[in-house]
Structure formats: C-alpha cells, structure tokens
Image (cartoon, helix red, strand yellow):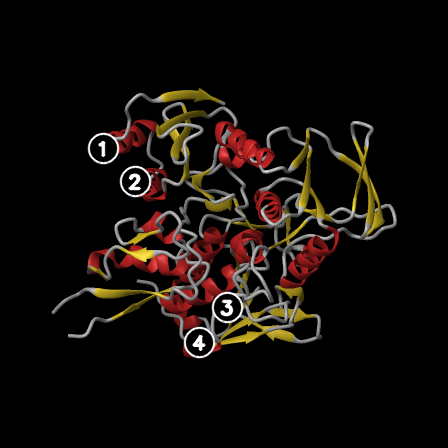
Amino acid sequence: MTTKADSLENVVIVGASAAGLSAADGLREGGYDGPIIILGDERHEPYDRPTLSKKLLASQGEPQLHALRTRERLEAADVTLLLGHRAVGLDVDRHYVVTENGDAVPWDAVIVATGSRPRTLVTTEAEPLPVLRTPADLHVLREAAARYGHVTLIGAGLIGLEVAASLSGHQVEVTLINDLDLPLRNVLGAPVAEEVRELHSRHGVDLLLGVSVESVSGGPGSYSVQLSNGSTHRTSFILVGIGVDANDEWLDGSGLALDEGVVVDAAGRANVPGVWAAGDVARLLSHPSLPASTRVEHWTHAIEHGRHVGLNAARGTSVPYAGVPYFWTEQYGRRFHGYGRIRPDDTALFVEGSLGDEEYLVLYGSDDELHAVVSCGCVRSLRGYRKVLERNGSWREALDVARHTNLVGDVALHTN
Amino acid sequence: MSDQVEVLIDTKLCNAYGVCVTIMPDVFDTPAGSPVAVLLRDRVEAHERDDLDEAIRACPAQALATREPPS
C-alpha cells in the first residue's frame, strides 16, 4: 500500500493536448484529489489533432474540431486549464514552472507533456515553410490548395501521405518529394509500403523519390526547389512533413536529462524527483518490447502513456509502461492499422489475404520474435496479435493466433 | 444485479477511425462504406470493462461513452 498521493498537494501538467489531459485523468483515477493545473500554449480549447490531416482537409466549410475535453468534464474532474500559458522554464529547486506571462506556478509534482512540433525547412530568404500541426496551418493549406490547384509536399511520412491522398482526391495536383525510395517503409513494412506508393502513383500523385531537397527559394505562388539530382522543381505552394522534434527546449538548463526529449525511466520519471514526462516529449529509456531509448509519436501512445504516468504519480508507484505503439491511417479509402515496431531485418508474413487484395494482414518479426502487425481492412483480427505483442510473445504464438482464426492457408512469404 | 454497462456511440462525433474495433472487435465494427462505427452489441460485462474503458480513452473523436443500464 502506498499513500503517496496524500503527500502531493499541487500537481502541474505542462501541455494541454492528448498526453497532458490523459495524465490528469490518470491522477484522478489513481486517487489524487488535490489541485491539478494544466498549462497550454495554444489558445484553442484542446482538440483532436489527428483529424486535421485525416478528415478536415477533405471536409467542406469551416473546420469542425472535436473537443478533446469539454469544460463541463474538466470542471467535474476539478481540473484547472490555463490556455495561452506557454511554459518557458522549470525551476527544480524551488519547484516552479515559469510561463511566458511571467507567472511562477508552484508544484510538488510536475508532468511534462509538451509534445512535439513539426520540423520545417527555411527558404533561402529565411522564411520557414508551412507545416500541418494546428487549425491555422490547416486553414493556410486549404486556401492554398483552392487558390493554386497544386501543392508540393516535402517528406512522405504518415501526415504527408494523408495530405497527398486527401488533396489528390479533390482535383488538386500533388507532387511528393522524398529522399527515400520507399516512403513509410519503417512504419508499414516493405510490401505494404510498396503498395501504398503504387496507390499514390495510380491516383496521379507525381512522386519524386530518392531525391533530397537542397534549397528552396521564393514564396507562396512561386517557389523554386533545388533537388539533389540537379533538377529544379517549380511549384506554387509547399507543405513540409519531415518528422517532428520534441518540445523540450524550454527545459534547457533546468537540470532535467534531455536527449531529443525528456529522458524518463519505464515508469515515466525524469532524473529529478517529482518530475515526470509523458507522450511525444518523453524518451523512454526502457520498454519491454521496444528498442532502448525510443520516443513514440502516436495518438494512442500519448493517451495511454499520459494516463499511466498520471497513475504512477498519484500512487507513488513505479509501474513500468508496456503499451505497444499503434497507428492508423486512411489513404484512398483504405484503412491501415498497425501495432508494434518493424525492425530492418524483419521478415513479412501475410496471414490474411495477400498484396493487391482489398484486405490483408501482415506479421513482421525475426528470430522467433513478433515485432509488429499491419492490417489493411482486417481491423477485426488485430486484437489477438496485439495481445501477443503486449506480452512480448513469440512469432510462434502469433502463428497460433493465425491458425486459431483458421486463416492461414497458403501463406506467402515476403522478405523485406 | 447485472454488472453490465451500456455502450453509447455519438454518431455525430464518430469518424469511423476504427481504433475501438482494434480493441473490442466483438463490440464495435466499422463496416466498409459506413461513415460511423456500429455496435455489434450494446451491453458489456463487468470483466470487459477494462477493454471498454481503453476504447473510450483511445477514441480520438471522444465519441464513446457508457451508461448504467436501467434496472
């Protein structure tokens, strides 16, 4: 029995999106009933960010953002949400979070959930190029797509490809520039990534793959992109999607261990007592089924890790986090879902359907270990494999699941 | 004295992402072409509550809720 929550009197959560809000829920679920203050930098009420790239781009009219938490629900949980309060410093000796407004917010536990932000590129005129992260970004992109009818995407991660699929379905010409030949290979695995590349190609997306961007000049309406193969690409509008960086600069010099994110143990504790981190910003030193020192930048990770850290903070416990990374994406009407992390040497095994089918399910693993499962349309089958991943189970156990569902007939072996 | 709870989907919020289906495929489904998820049954048992709570948390659209069934 631990009654650590009794000694907590003041918890501050920095960051008002998925991880931070879930941490507040975890604190309450874990029995902490004292004050919770959440500091958010944006002025919007917390909203469902995945919808920006997954749905709103294609919708008509003003974007309708789903609220992550209603005011009523926050009030019922007795959580104080302070929007427009960007944290700029953490004082670990006197236990304050300092905000850009000059406030010093006291804490005896603080949960850092400041998330991540898109990397961008700057033009030769030193102007940062647009990204997609906020409703304002979405507004700019939609206007530009309507005005110019042509958008060039630099980078082909999940968001870039979702945007490409969404725009090309709406009579917008799309060019996609990516330094890798096979976008999303590390997320979907080689065979599925090849099919997704083919889908984009078939829908008319102009793919410039295996080339990198040397420089960009110009501005909206007339950009000139110098490519590593010596050619020049001209376009009216550019959206950059080349990954994200942890929002941890505000902690420089605080005494917290930082390594492209706040370094936390398996329980979510940072190196300074009373300080925790959750979600995108947290670099997990250890995890039962992931490579050491990993950041996970997916929606459900933010939710589950946030809650988990809130529970540990409330109870004074050190329960290790074991949630398996999960993503989903929809492109051209196909829904892809995946659990786990594919590794470079993994073998791919189709246990339902096969490539080219509308629906299929692929396992990835090596050395009798299951590392990941990716579904196209077979979402109902994922649960069993997910359970295997959660207990760090073997390839053999995954095959048992496949046999149990009586779905392994002639299995096709693809090697990455 | 049923330990069941009732599951509710707010179809105005649901985007048919299918996250709930990956967690409870015997409760939720996203039929091809449907703009929203559907319920295969609207009651879950006490031993399924952890999974249901996870599905509720994981829904990006916050479209899921529970209600104690009328006795």
Q: CA distance from mark 4 to mark 2?
A: 39 Å
Share a chain, discs 1 and 3?
yes
Picture coordinates of residue A112, whole percent (x, y): 56, 60
Q: CA distance from mark 3 to mark 4?
A: 25 Å
Q: Label 3: which residue?
A: A67
Share a chain, discs 2 and 1?
yes
Q: CA distance from mark 2 to mark 1?
A: 10 Å
Share a chain, discs 4 and 2?
yes
Asked which secondary structure carries label 1, the reply is helix
- The relative height of residue A129 versus residue A95 in the rendered view (above or below) is above
Q: CA distance from mark 3 to mark 2?
A: 31 Å
Q: Could you tell which of marks 3 and 2 lies nearer the N-terminus?
A: 3
Q: Do the residues bearing badges 2 and 1 touch, measured as CB atoms within 8 Å? A: yes
* Amino acid of disc 4: Gly
Please give the chain letter of the residue carrying mark 4. Answer: A
Asked which secondary structure carries label 4, the reply is loop
Q: For residue A22, which numbered disc appears in the image?
A: none
Please, which residue is most extreme toward the front here?
A171
From the viewer's perspective, tell me whether residue A371 is left or right of residue A43: left
Q: Could you tell which of marks 3 and 4 lies nearer the N-terminus?
A: 4
Residue at position x 30%, y 27% from top?
A396
Q: CA distance from mark 4 to mark 1?
A: 48 Å
* Amino acid of disc 1: His
Q: For residue A404, which numbered disc appears in the image?
A: 1
* Amino acid of disc 2: Gly
Q: Is residue A166 visible?
A: yes
Please give the chain letter of the residue carrying mark 2. Answer: A
Share a chain, discs 4 and 1?
yes
Q: Label 4: which residue?
A: A34
